[in-house]
Image (cartoon, coloured by chain):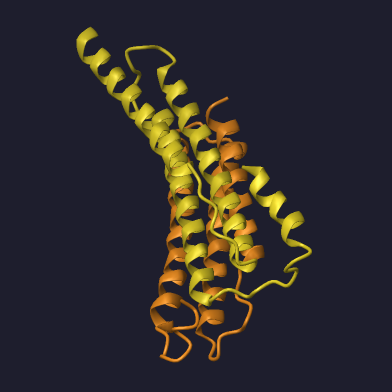
Chain colours: A orange, B yellow
Amino acid sequence: MSDTTTGDPPDRGLQAERTTLTWTRTSFAFLVNGALLMVKNLHGTAGPAALIPAVLAAAVALGTYVIALQRQRTLGLSPLPTRITPRRQVYIVGIAVLVLIAVTAVAQLL
Amino acid sequence: MADNTTTPAGEQGAESPAEIEPDYRFTLANERTFLAWQRTSLGLLAAAVAVVQLVPQLAVPGARRVLAVGLAALAILTSGMGLLRWRQADYAMRHGLPLPRHPTPGFLAVGLSLVGVIALGLVIAKAVMG
């Protein structure tokens, strides 16, 4: 597939846009989790320790949004850099999800 | 599943050590797939929190907790698998190998079906027992 597409103009815009929007959507998914973790605190019993998971979720949401902005800038470059694999960003988000699950589980389920 | 990431390095090393930079569209598609897995995981986590926080006491005591722990476990597996699959697909694309085939979506479907059946059972139990 790669050799047939070298000649014609590639549809850069849509690919970059879809990928950036995917990062933004993931950021909102973190934010929704943070909001949900705040529900209990609205009904009273609000110790500062109870806020940790929600604050973590909000911080990770912000971080993911910053990555989305970075990706938007990188993918908007012309010509595109040869190496655009977001290895570091992928590991950051993957590990952040796992940590958030662990912290939430400790706070809510145990 | 871990074998997939480790074995090709030994086999391919002598023949084609050079990495091919894949077509940017494949890299981006892999990235989007990874993020979709992470969002699925976050959705499962949200469901687990909602079950604990928002669902009233069910007919069977402790059922909420079991359901929530199951959802959280599914969330961990989904997130970990997403990361693993991204890495394997990236490796395969760079070395010109066929993409790894995984039964992971099947596992997720089975897990979600199980959660659905348990939830349905609890709803029926609540309705019958008042």
Q: Position of residue B32 (x, y in %)?
A: 47, 63
Q: Where residue B11 sits in the image (x, y, percent)? A: 73, 56
> Residue shown at 73%/72% (left/top)?
B18
Nearest the viewer among A97 and B31 is B31
Name of the residue lying farthest toward the right: B14
Q: What percent of the width, then of the height, locates residue B69?
A: 50, 27
Q: Is residue B91 above or below residue A98?
A: below
Q: Judge from the rendering whether residue A89 lies leftward or rightward of residue A33; answer left or right.
A: right
Residue A60 in picture, x, y percent from top left: 57, 56
Tell me the quarter of the picture where residue A80 sits.
Answer: bottom right
Which of the 4 quarters of the picture holds residue B107? Answer: top left
Q: Nearer the viewer, residue B76 or A64?
A: B76
**Above-or-below relation of A22 to B24:** above
> Residue A98 vs residue B117: left or right?
right
Does residue A55 appear to the left or right of A32 in the view shown?
A: right
Whether residue B5 appears in this view of the structure is yes
Q: So how many labels did they put on this image?
A: 0
Instruction: Look at 61% across and 55% down and name the residue there.
Output: B88
Looking at this view, is B55 or B89 the one in front? B89
Q: Is residue A38 visible?
A: no
Residue displayed at 63% across by 75% down: B21
